[in-house]
Image (cartoon, coloured by chain):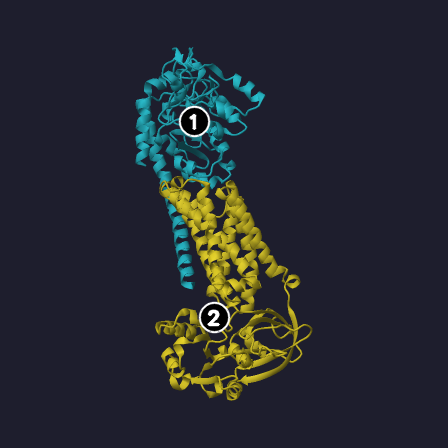
Chain colours: A yellow, B cyan
Amino acid sequence: MKEKLGNFIFVYLSIAPVFLWIAAKPLNLRFQNFSSTLSSFGQITGLIGMSMFALNFVLATRSKFLEDYFGGMNKVYTSHRIFGSLSFIFILFHPILLALRYVPVSIEGAAYSLFPLGQPIWITSGFISLFALMLFLVLIFYSSLPYNVLKFTHKFIGLSFFFAGLHALFIPSDVSNFFPLKAYFIFLTIAGLSCFLYRSVLEKYLIKKYKYIVGDIVLVNNKTIEVSLVPALESMDHQSGQFVFVSFKSKDISSESHPFSISSGENDKNLRVSIKFLGDYTSKLINLRKGTPAEIEGPFGRFCCSDKNKNKVWIAGGIGITPFLSMARSIENQNCNIDLVYIIKNENDGAHLEELREISKNNSRFRILPYFSQIHGRITASFIRNVCPGFENREIYLCGPPQMMKSLKDQLLSLKIPSGNIFSEEFKML
Amino acid sequence: MKWLVTIALFVFWAVFASTLAAGLVFYQKTKDINKVLSIKTEQAEQGSTLTKESLASNQGSTLMSLTKDEVAKHNKASDCWMTIDNKIYNFTSYMNQHPGGPATITPYCGKDGTSAFVDKPHSKAAFSMLTDYYVGALNSKIAVKTSNAVTNNSTTPKPGSALKPVAKVIYNSPTPFVPTQATPQVQSTQVNLTTSEVANHSSLSDCWMIVSGKVYNVTSYIPSHPGGSGTIAPYCGKDATSAFSGHSQNANNILGSYYIGDLNSSVSSPSSSSAGSGVSTNPQVTNPVITNSPSNRRGSRGDDDDD
């Protein structure tokens, strides 16, 4: 239950200013005619958009306490993306609704109010914020810029937020006239800006990072390497199924941090991550050499076993095997029967397949069921039901490409598997 | 989520672009309409106000009808009139001082801004500042100075030209007084200071109140009230004894200078008692002339309801 609380709290905090706004003035005055109704909706979108904007910086802090309330850092980031998009939509409608209220009176007036120049500074700062935010979101959603450039542009969103804060606090409105609302927005703006500074500017000084050094690099198939990281000083404890942010300090590789699933077992002294050459960044990791320093932030994630005594089905697609590999490597910590369905194109494509077979040989409670999609086509949930006895009462863990996970999740739900028994690791971050 | 953002972006730019485009088009159109409108009103005024006009022109001034059409002519930031609660204000000099910027006022220039004014979070000070820009009541007439050179054809000031109502009152009232809904038409009779009479003076521009059995006309004091006019307004026309009780000795002294008479006593010359009210502090527009009667007020109300 606790892991669902985060979203509730954040949604509540986003709409809380609307309640204060209602308290500021009687509603019949706010909705007495067309103009005032549009104006009120314009204000509401502004209030919610600004609150979500501010709260989204809190979600982006990667603070560990958020994990308990969202069920893992990857879920925090999912919420971050949804909140960011909603905030943007609200903010887009804010000037539109406020301008349209003038239409019954004067169309020139409406046009004039949408024109960013020649207006008081607080209105102009609102427009600056809006257009900066728009540029930023268009880059994220529609451009194919490399990850490190996109991450860099994230720093400018702080600027957009700064102008949004000026606009919200100083423009003559209920926020500036009604103290509780003003106090709430001062608090939100300060919270948002400090979270932004914490994450982007003060990151170096405030966020704990473990120093590691790249050890052995093993090629596990033609597209995947497993990198072993040796602690330089203090080593980091982790649970199976968690992930870390790694940044390699090498002139051949850009230095921003990227998330990787941990593939080493819980008792492993070294930290191991499996990396598939997929995008701009990961394909550069072919240049990674032994002895390269690395900084690790983490561990994050809650993709572990909720009930140690319940039988489980693990479903891995491609590189999605990584968290299960970690669990299999510390299989002695699992007190249940486990079937691992490993979906790969063919025998040669399966990273770590041999090692997993080896573990299965030595442990009667762990079965490995490779599924070759090149031969059998797309996997279905009913196929999994047929090969895994007692399927209906097991906990089902999913990790793989987003499309595969979504399709399997839908099929599982239609097979009447309670959603509380399905655990999935969506892995998409920015 | 991506498609939602796409739709929102699309809607934003569609509305944004079409509003700006429509604004440009209408800007051209209203220019033309205004030309026609100003000619029409001039003609109408020449007919209807001829006698009064001639009366007025004898004194170097002319009468101007404060009609909706007249207000409509002053419809831009550089010449901005507005009707608020059936009273007409000239906000031209105020535009750049508006805390919300001129842009938020401009759309209402030449229009009825009542609901826009009331439903914004305007402070008490804003309500009292209104009086500084008062021109006259809707559908009343005010005297306007005309230069000797102009003929009857140009009695209506062109938009943008400075309107300077003269201090002279056209009707026979010896002292200028302010239009209020309750101002008695009588000029000099005995008035009984009953609670119901006090209740007649219940607006910011005509505000009587009872404190400890005495009746005061505090209209001219309202703009100077440290707590803003909004804190007084609710007591206009009422007994304010308890509300006033916390005030300083100094406040008591000030109150004394607004004394009219004891409650339930009888005083003469109500016109002088309601004189010297809020509008007279107006630096630009002094003492507009009133010709409105209760009946045409009702008429104008009805018009507004249709809007």
Q: Which of A385 and B2 is in front in this view?
A: A385
Q: Is residue A275 left or right of residue B161?
A: right
Along the viewing direction, whichever of B104 and A13 lies nearer the viewer: A13
Q: Residue A360, can we see it? A: yes
The residue to which callout 1 is attached is B135
Q: What residue type is labelled 1?
A: Val
Q: Residues within 10 Å of mark 1 (few under 14, many from 20)?
A: many
Foreground mark, 1 or 2, reads 2
Count of marks, rendered view: 2
**For residue A207, above or below residue A287:** above
Instruction: Report how far apart the C-alphas of labels 1 and 2 lie in the structure.
Output: 67 Å
* Residue holding disc 2: A426
Return the x and y of residue A12 as percentages of the image width and height: 47, 54
**Vertical comparison of B234 with B196: above or below:** below
**Amino acid under label 2?**
Glu
Is the residue marked by circle 2 packed among few (<14), some (14-19), or many (20+) residues within 10 Å?
A: some
Percent x, y for residue B49?
Answer: 33, 21
Does residue A430 show up? no
Residue at point 49%, 52% (across, down): A50
